[in-house]
Image (tube, helix red, strand yellow):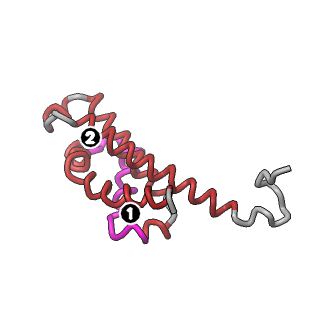
Amino acid sequence: MACTGSCETGCCAKLPMLKSERDAELRLDDILQAIERIRSYVSGADFARFEGEAMLFDAVSMNVLVIGESIGRLPDRLKDRLGALPWRSMVAVRNLVAHGYPELDAKIVWDIATTRLDALEAVIAPMLAEVRNP
């Protein structure tokens, strides 16, 4: 019978690392998917439309939240390897979306959606490839 990962004999000593790697892969993939969704939502839009269409604003904001949540769940050792991105700021924006939504400034979300995603993708995409193909 194969080990199920629930034993206490020590045969699963590597399981937490494998789970951590799998979790990191899922989080990195979530970030890239959220980036693509945001890009598709704002494609062809200007700030006036973004600010005026609640559904567009909400969709982008939700994906900004997904990015921040996923970043917050990445292991610190992985974020250290990914470089000097403003990780805490990204998580802070997630918290603003999640907990301070009525006060969320459309200009901040628009700035993220239109100017910040390329730098994030440039770091996340290669790391995801590395995690998938060690």
- Residue 39 image label: 2
Q: Amino acid at mark 1?
A: Arg
Task: Where is residue 85? Give x, y as percent.
Answer: 33, 65
Give, as a single range, the part of the protein colored magenta: 81-105
Q: Is residue 12 magenta?
A: no
State if disc 2 and disc 1 touch (CB < 8 Å). no
Whether residue 114 is visible:
yes
- Residue 53 image label: none
Q: Is residue 41 placed above or below 86 in the rendered structure? A: above
- Front: mark 1 or 2: 2
Name the residue: 43% across, 66% down.
79
Q: Pointer 1: what residue?
A: 88
Comparing 103 with 116, the one in front is: 116
Residue 38, quarter of picture: top left
Q: Amino acid at mark 2?
A: Arg
Whether residue 100 is visible:
no
Name the residue: 20% across, 35% down.
43
Task: Where is residue 44? Give x, y as percent.
Answer: 16, 33
